Amino acid sequence: MTKTLALTCALAIGLGSTLTACSNDGGDAREPSVGNETLAAALADGDSVREMSDALKDTGLAQVFDGSAAYTVLAPSNEALSALEDQNDLSTDEGRAVLAAVLREHVLPGALTPDDIENAIAVQKGSVWIRTMGEGTMRFAMDGSMLTVTDESGKTAQVSGDAILASNGVVIPIDGVLKQP
């Protein structure tokens, strides 16, 4: 088993026990509570990630996030996705296929919160690599107190908002689009 795969599995297993322990009982303000809605619904309800929700619907990927499998969605800000659409014609069939490939690179298997990723970075003493659903890998590291994610080409984004926990995963808002066409 590769180090990346082993780390992803360990994070997912560790999060499983964390998610069952979360509640909205006024505990740690940074610890988000688990939502009752699916990732698809959580994305549609999130104002800062609405463009991501629309893009997933346009490409046919949204239905994946209504299922029971757990995912972590790195959701670029509305502004970042709008800029990508302005720079590329994504309204054609070919454009939607390109967009779908970009979006798959923003999806990680398993449900990982930013705290889970930060804990793994601390254990690894530097950074961790996690494989995406698009067969790429993303490198997570700390830049001061900011959690950053970098794709294989070196494009970096920062976590830019609070994570949204859904019944089948986590949405982590980021300030940029990684793995661009």
Image: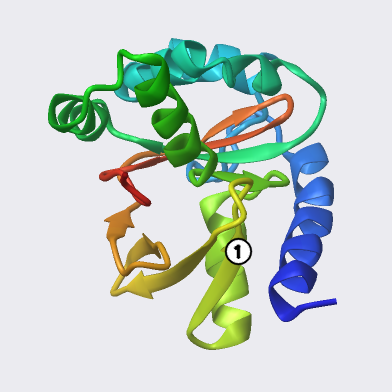
Horizontally, is 159 left or right of 164 in the view?
Answer: left
Horizontally, is 25 left or right of 43 in the view?
Answer: right
Name the quadrant containing residue 6.
Answer: bottom right
Query: Which residue shows up at 26% across the image and 30% down it?
Result: 81
Query: Which residue shows up at 39% across the image and 24% down it?
Result: 94
Residue 100 coordinates in the image, percent (x, y): 48, 30
User: Is any atom of residue 21 visible in this view?
Assistant: yes
Q: Is residue 8 above or below residue 67?
A: below
Q: Is residue 82 above or below residue 118?
A: above
Tell me the quadrant of the picture where the N terminus can be found.
Answer: bottom right
Horizontally, is 16 left or right of 22 in the view?
Answer: right
Residue 60 coordinates in the image, percent (x, y): 57, 15
Instruction: Give the mark count.
Output: 1
User: Is any atom of residue 163 visible in this view?
Assistant: no
Q: Nearer the viewer, residue 22 or 158?
A: 158
Residue 170 coordinates in the image, percent (x, y): 60, 36
Find the residue positioned furthest to the bottom.
Answer: 125
Find the residue positioned furthest to the front.
Answer: 94
Query: Which residue shows up at 14% across the image and 32% down it?
Result: 87
Q: Is residue 1 above or below residue 74?
A: below
Q: Considering the numbered disc 1 on the image, is that residue within a helix, a strand or a loop?
A: strand
Q: Nearer the viewer, residue 98 or 130?
A: 98
Residue 38 coordinates in the image, percent (x, y): 67, 17
Colour convention of the picture: rainbow
Tell me the quadrant of the picture where the C terminus can be found.
Answer: top left
Residue type highlighted by circle 1: Ile
Query: Which residue shows up at 34% across the image and 14% down it?
Result: 92
Callout 1: few (<14), some (14-19), or many (20+) C-alpha neighbours within 10 Å?
A: many
Name the quadrant containing residue 162.
Answer: top left
Name the quadrant containing residue 7.
Answer: bottom right
The residue wearing badge 1 is: 130
